[in-house]
Image (spheres, rainbow, N blue to C red):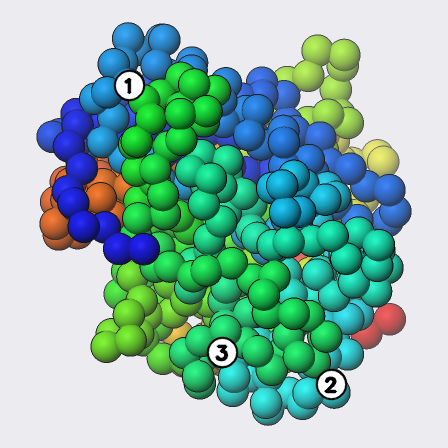
Amino acid sequence: MTNSSVASGNYLLGFDVGSSSVKAALLDTETGKIIGSAVSPAQEMEMIAHKPGWAEQAPEDWWKYVTITSKTLIKEYSIDPADIAAIGISYQMHGLVAVDENRQVVRPSIIWCDSRAAEIGSNAFEQLGSKYCLTRYLNSPGNFTASKLKWVKENEPELYKIIYKVMLPGDYISMKMTGEIGTTVSGLSEGILWDYEQQGLADSLLEFYGIDERLIPNTYLSFDMHGKLTPEAAEEIGLKQGIQVSYKAGDQPNNAFSLNVLEPGEAAATAGTSGVIYGVTGDNAFDPKSRVNTFVHVNHNSGKPRNGVLLCVNGTGIMNSWLRKTLGTEKKPDYDQLNKLASKAPIGADGVTILPFGNGAERIFENRDLGASVKKLNFNRHETAHLLRAAQEGIVFALNYGFEIMGAMNMQFNTVKAGHTNMFLSPLFREAFVNTTGLTLEMYNTDGALGAARGAGYGAGVYTTYEETFSGLELIDRIEPDSVIRAAYQESYQNWYTLLQFELNN
């Protein structure tokens, strides 16, 4: 579905559909500056966990919050819907959404942090052969979308029988907007449904799982015409029918795009519910143990391949959120207060060490679920500040552990880019990040929703070059490692690493 006409309008609208909330942002097409944004719901979205390691959400809720944020923006900033040129969608990766022939959801979405299919993926990796999987898919089938669909086939056969199409969360939102069911090459790769050798659908994995390839939607590029707003959808979300959806990408490829991370040697970071480092390569690089994962990047094409290597730590911002809810009084402190309190403790938190792995199986440990743990806590010496600091340092150390895996893949970086949001708002977190990794950190005035809006502009032809697309992107801060305190962070990291190895070996 190619884009044959250039969209016109004063604004671009981007949606970032996360597991915590939906954010929408309006971008001025001429200046590249943000007009405004809206987030819904005010509190984090519910995750359904019927069993340990499970995590589900209702796709209908995502759509509800898309409608709320869209209408809020239009009303609050007095926008004429006719002035919106195009829509872009960013979404939480790896989720499974299944619909019947009437486009009704068959079951709640099995989302990214659900670990129930890990064993299925591990068995496939073993039986198909690691060499075969790494050559063809650049990954183990692991706990990704294809394996989640196999779990439904095995455990919910009656529901499986009525599935018409399966898709990713962003594909579902796009379907609700346009009535069209489709996915992207990048999206297929994140589900381990893309064969890099054949440059097409991973039919060999589908055959192994006994899954009919007719369940997989038509496939497009990330920058493409994914459809136009139907009259019904336009009325629901307060927009004008016919606006094109011209960009769609998973949250981490989109985060990298939002930061203009498109070429080999460039890297992006985010630290929301999960923490991610996403580095771009022109090679079909892979980790032999599939502890970090390679996916097709948004700007990939057959003549100029671009892949993104993704390091994910599930337990990052969610741990900070848990501490906020658990510590303190009935009136919970805000994150700025937590950050200030954490900074009162010394580097290394006076020996308190936290492993932040309490959000399901972690890929960097080959899908083992270690759980979170606190070590060397002394009731006579340590206070809340020590716990808060140890948590932030533990998250950074976990990311650095993943950096070391990427380094073994011959991926080298000097600078990492991040949006001025989530845990990167914490000065302590930024300090720990640059001095543990030894990398320069650049902070920009962007986020996932703004990235989706810029992607919509490029996909719709409003912008014809990446230079135009990122004209409004501004550097907010640049943080360099400090040789004086870097040694202290290195020592603290080594202590953390020693504890981690003990946990992994026992």
Q: Which residue is mark 3?
A: 195
For disc 2, the marked residue is 126
Q: In the image, 324: left or right of 160?
A: left
* Residue at 26%, 65% in the rendered image: 263
Residue 105 shows in the view? yes
Ranked by sequence position, the earlier of labels 3 and 2 is 2
Indicate the secondary structure of the residue bearing disc 3: strand
Residue located beneath label 1 in the image: 81
- Three-letter residue code for mark 2: Glu
* Residue 402 percent across, percent down from the top left: 55, 65
Q: Is 233 in front, or is 302?
A: 233
The disc, 1 or 2, on the residue closer to the chain's N-terminal end is 1
Rendered residue at 25%/26% (across/down): 84
What amino acid is at disc 1? Answer: Pro
Q: Is residue 180 left or right of residue 330?
A: left
Q: Height in image: 473 above or below 490?
A: above
